[in-house]
Amino acid sequence: MMKAEIKINNTLQRKLKRLEQTVDDRVQDKLVAIAHTAVNLSPVDTGAYVSSFSFSTGRGRPRGKSSKNLAKGQYSREEGLANLMQDIQRIPSFKNTTRIVLRNNAPHARAVEYKHGYAVFTKIRNIHG
Amino acid sequence: MASIHKDIRAALEVHLSNQSGLPSIAYENVPFSPTTGQSYIQCRYIPTLRRPAVRGLNPQQRYDGVFQMLVYSPEGTGPATAEGYAETLLEAFEATTKIEYTGSETITVSIDYAERQQGFLDTPWYYIPVDIGWYTYK
């Protein structure tokens, strides 16, 4: 009988773990960059649009605020960014996530994108791929 | 280059206007009154990035952006008309197309991608967005 013993190199294991962490960090960095772009490109009147962005992995209802009956400046870019950062933190593991979607469920999101010409998602796709 | 965006826009708009079989085009900040019942295309020039292409002093700059066209057709007539025009636009601005234009100087605008989005209703129109990703170096 022939046999070959293969020794598992602990160093290799550690390197693979570090690589996984690097991938996680890179994905997170990318999501943070997208969040900043989305918020900075958004027009702000009542703030309903900018605070309606969300990252989702498929479950749950996306954020969506109507601007009706809201005062000017009721919501801010900072709140919009905080919402997205919270969504990123809530993703349990990037390793087990195959799809993360940026959404804006404000009822007037389409008008902001095309009718008023802000093209926020169009620009995000162009800048971040 | 102060006039680079003027030249890039002109390159894209001239390329659009040279395509046959398209309806009237509404250019940015040019008076246009859509006629109810007649299709038209609204175009927008959307620059996104200007970044050094190389390291060092006085680097060449890379300009990126989107040329967005909204294809409008009359509401209630089905999607085929708008989709037909959208296909024409996708073919005219297909990825890797190079558009040369001589304005203040000769530039080449390269097409990175051409894609369409789903159609939407905006009474009395049905419209399909077509996004053309472009880049150039200067």
Image: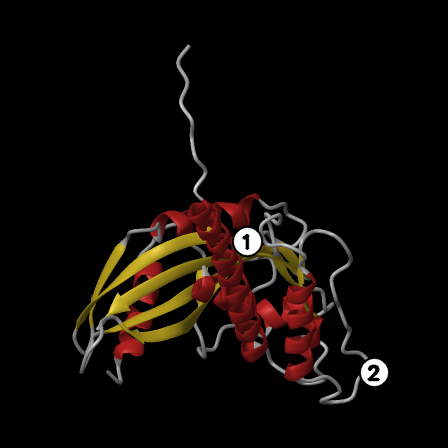
Q: Nearer the viewer, residue A115 or A129?
A: A129
Q: Secondary structure at mark 1?
A: loop
What colour scheme does the image use?
Answer: secondary structure
Which chain's residue wears label 1?
B
Q: Nearer the viewer, residue A68 or A105?
A: A105
Instruction: Find disc 2 in the rendering and name its residue.
Output: A69
* Residue B107 image offset from top left, x and y in percent: 20, 68
Residue B72 in the figure: left or right of residue B50: right
Residue A102: in sight, yes or no? yes
Q: Residue furthest top?
A: A1
Instruction: Find disc 1 in the rendering and name its residue.
Output: B117
Residue B100, by quadrant, is bottom left
Residue positioned 20% across, 74% down in the render: B60
* Residue B130 image offset from top left, x and y in percent: 48, 56
Q: Residue furthest right?
A: A69
Badge 2 crowding class, 10 Å Cα cut-off, few under 14, some 14 to 19, many 20 or more, is few
Up/down of B114 relative to A5, above or below:
below
Callout 2 amino acid: Asn
